[in-house]
Amino acid sequence: MGVIMIRLVLFTCICLMSQRLSAQEAPCGTVPFSKEKVKEIERIATSLSGVSTAGITYLPVKLHLTRYSSGGTAYYPIKQAVYEFAKLNEKFLPLGFQFYLCDTVNYIDDYRLDEFTSPYYSTDSLALVMYNVNNAINVYYVNESNVGGRSNFPSGDKFYNWMFVKNGNFDLGETLIHEMGHYFNLYHTFETYLGAELVNGSNCSTAGDLVCDTPADAYPITYDRISCQYTGTHKDANNQLYMPSTTNYMSYYGGGCIFEFTEGQRDRAQAGHAARLSMMNSAGNQYNFTYPSNDTIFVSNVRAFELFGSVNLKWETNAYPLGFIIERSTSPNSGFVAIGSNNGVYGLQFVDKDVQAGVTYYYRVKSVTSAANYSLVASITPSVNSYPYGSSYNPSVHDVRYFQFYNSLGYVSLAAYFPNYLDPYFDYSDKIGSVIANEKYRVYWLDYYNYSSNRDSFKVWVDLNKNRIFESSEMLASGNGSYSSDSLMIPANTPTGYYRMRFRTNNSSYPFSDSDRQLFSDTKDITLYINGTCEGSSLPVIGYQFLDTISDEGIETIDFTGTYPEPYSGYPVRFSASSVTLNPGFIADGYNTFQADTDGCE
């Protein structure tokens, strides 16, 4: 009882101290310890600065998902948590840290935690730490809170080994990354607890965020959320205008503007981690980071297929963990960085939407519960560049659920469904739809925000000339509601083949293009197969599986006069050409499947 009362007083002190920052608590509720405690942390961190090595420190994370009650609001989707976790690994790699999840998720039915108030009511925090594990970093997702997230600065006391993030309040993982930064002793770039930093940087090591390569910042934050440009007129004590960085993770320039840490923050994070370890030891090792990496889950047979403007990865596994992390490099032996995740719900695959022609990429995959048990490396050299992103911010409330094309008879001719991934742009070029040139189609769509017809405006482009640019002449349909205001029709002279189609929404009344940055917008790309005119055009067929039904030592010609399943959608496709001749020396045993390329028209 005495321990609880002491901590209750401590939280009360934090509450009073945090009132000076009441305006900034909407995004983040993390506040420094008392000045005496801060000075102690800085003394230890300074004495240990420079101890970092070139290696990577792997740390376990215990994931806790809360719910108001057993029959209340659903837990935060695992796929979203894994998505944010991949972003966390991507952004903390330059700082020298990588994270792996504990094997199981702790599900909590507790209204006190699902509607977490921080830091005004200490009872919520006292209830939360009861669920902490003492051999990993504890990360909680709560459904409601008066702040977007909260963390704790380095301490040897197990009571402070936790952070939380409000469900859906991530903006590409920004909040989780931001709160983890605090865990490693990084302050807000506009911090004034130890004094306001001057624009000229003369006091950068003793005031502000105590990092000299982050420009002085000011609060309140004033910036254009579309251009990410600072628009404020605040001045420091020397009457100099602030010129802050709007890209730093420890700032409040959110909505997709922030994406980096600095070298100075890396050094401070390394020293902060070393200070935490020292304080943990001094406090009697109340907690540690010893949760074991799960190396029993293997990822095998990673394959890379080129799609038009992207790369599709597929793999196999001996078990299904919470998710998978996909890493990429331009070297087969080093330089791998997390580029995305998959939790297996939508198949063991991943589409890399950011590739350049002529560059050889190397990929590897691991379970999210493993520190470094990677698959063998797969490689591919794309022949065409990726398409430009459709950029937006705060996409979570307007994520496109599906769109459909109806023909003149009212039947659905094309239906493309998408998981609720909350990414402002996603390359679904592994999804293939089929339409007929010179026929009219009506467009209908839904989103995940209200599960019904959305009033947002939308546009549809098809890259008919295949130059990887969606030109104004290629915008074939648009609308201001769930239905298109005009009919979509592929021009009659379009050659038969595969094309990239972009479907984009925008909740504002302003004009929008195929890729400009917008509020509450979403972009989905798919591959469109157009039945048009042949006229000698080439139809690339990559990834189809044909069966050698001749049981001999080898074959030189494949007969495909029959129908074969399209490799992604599973629909049968028939080719007018009767056979394909293999390269000299190609050998395939009877009854085995293999990949083949051919030219022809349907």
Image (spheres, rainbow, N blue to C red):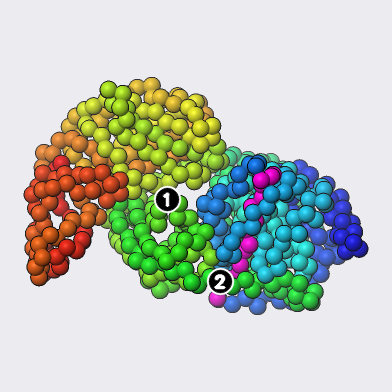
Quadrant that contains the N terminus: bottom right
- Please state which of residues 492 and 314 is positioned toward the viewer in this rendering: 314
Residue beneath disc 2 = 293
| N-term-proximal mark, 1 vs 2 | 2
- Residue 406, quarter of picture: top left
Q: Quadrant of residue 128?
A: bottom right
Return the mark for residue 481: none
Q: Which residues are magenta?
A: 54-70
Prevailing secondary structure class for the magenta stretch in the rendered image: strand
How many neighbours does mark 2 have within 10 angstroms: few (below 14), some (14-19), or many (20 or more)? many
Q: Looking at the picture, which amino acid does disc 1 mark? A: Tyr
Along the horizontal axis of the image, is 207 left or right of 489?
right
What x and y, as percent, mark residue 48? 71, 76
Residue 385 drawn at (x, y percent)? 32, 52
Residue 101 rendering spot, x and y as whole percentages: 57, 63
- Residue 425: image quadrant is top left
Q: Are marks 1 and 2 in contact (CB under 8 Å)?
A: no
Towards the viewer: 13 or 41: 13
SS of the residue under disc 1: loop
Res. 407 visible in picture: yes
Q: Residue sitting at 53 percent across and 70 percent down?
A: 294
Q: Secondary structure at mark 2?
A: loop
Q: Which residue is mark 1?
A: 346
Tell me if 101 is positioned left or right of 577 in this view.
Answer: right
Is 67 within the magenta?
yes
